[in-house]
Image (tube, rainbow, N blue to C red):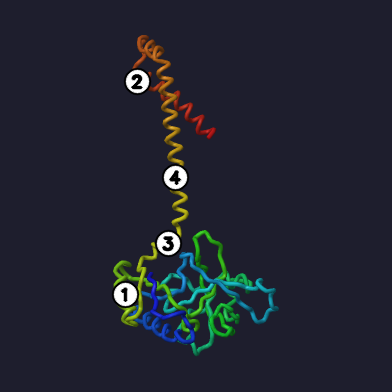
Amino acid sequence: TASAGLPIPGRFDPAADGAKWVASITAAMTNLNNAAGVSAAGAVSSLPLSGALESGGVRIPDRAPDPPGQGPNAQYSVVAGRYFRAAGINLAAGRTFDASDDAAGAATLIVNREFSRRYFGDERSALGRAVIPTFTFGPWREHTIVGIVDDVKQTALDAQRTPQAYITVAQMPYPGLAFVVRSTGDPGAVAATIRREVRAADPTFSVNEVRPWVDVLSESLARQRFSMTVIGVFAGSALALAVVGLYGVLSLLVGQRRREIGVRLVLGAKPSDVVRLMPAEGARVGVAGVVLG
């Protein structure tokens, strides 16, 4: 994965800056998908498991209006290139975006299974239906759902499934995308390919944070790993205290029974028998403590 952007002065204006941005992204996607060692390349406005998400309202034309703030809502992502193939997101029904989904073409959306299930009854019934996303920059208009993909977690692996919509960058120019590149060989070797092909498409492109996908996954698990580390430290400390305490008790018992041990040895007990006697008694105390604990 890698983040990319163009040096656009001031605030991004979709009407003024959108065409150049879309042309540069499209050229970069073409270069990457044709590059050696790349099986699929795409781009998305927010990487799965990155914690970054945006959401907005969705209207369903053939239904009665919902009260303000209570209508259908979905997380949305702007995508480019062969994003779903590159990210390994399975297409459940319909198709992915293609060249016909441009600014002049019919407005289209791809949604996830949860979107279809929640707003249309089952996982595939949303295919071919029309909705009006109110998160787009331009005038709101009907978009036809042309594909349904598997659910993807945006924030964490233990997050609940949420409705999600995908729109192509050609129909919603978006400033700044994260590239996702699936390589056929060593993922580390493709970093130079990403920089070379993206800048060949537009020399003003800035390419940053080139890293393997596993790093994104690691960051998403950082909080849980920290919690487990803290729990492990406290558990280890408790175990160490228990061991030291048990040793102290056994040491005291052995000291108090020194005369008895001497008598046992004088009467013919073997040293090995005496050695086994003390751990056996300590084991009984330890087992009782474990059970109570």
| Residue at x 35%, y 75% (from the top left corner) | 206
- Per the rendering, the mark at residue 122 is none
For the residue marked with disc 4, what is the amino acid? Gly
Mark 2, other Cα within 10 Å: few <14 / some 14–19 / many ≥20: few
In the rendered image, the vertical position of residue 229 relative to residue 212, given as above or below: above
Q: Which residue is mark 1?
A: 195
Q: Which residue is mark 4?
A: 232
Q: Earlier in the sequence, mark 1 or mark 3?
A: 1
- Quick check: marks 3 and 4 in contact, CB under 8 Å? no
Q: Nearer the viewer, mark 2 or mark 3?
A: 3
Q: Which residue is mark 3?
A: 217
- Quick check: marks 1 and 3 in contact, CB under 8 Å? no
Circle 3: element type: helix
Q: Could you tell me how far apart the alpha carbons at marks 2 and 1 are, in whole angstroms?
A: 72 Å
Q: Could you tell me how far apart the alpha carbons at marks 2 and 3 are, in whole angstroms?
A: 55 Å
Q: Earlier in the sequence, mark 4 or mark 1?
A: 1
- Per the rendering, the mark at residue 272 is 2
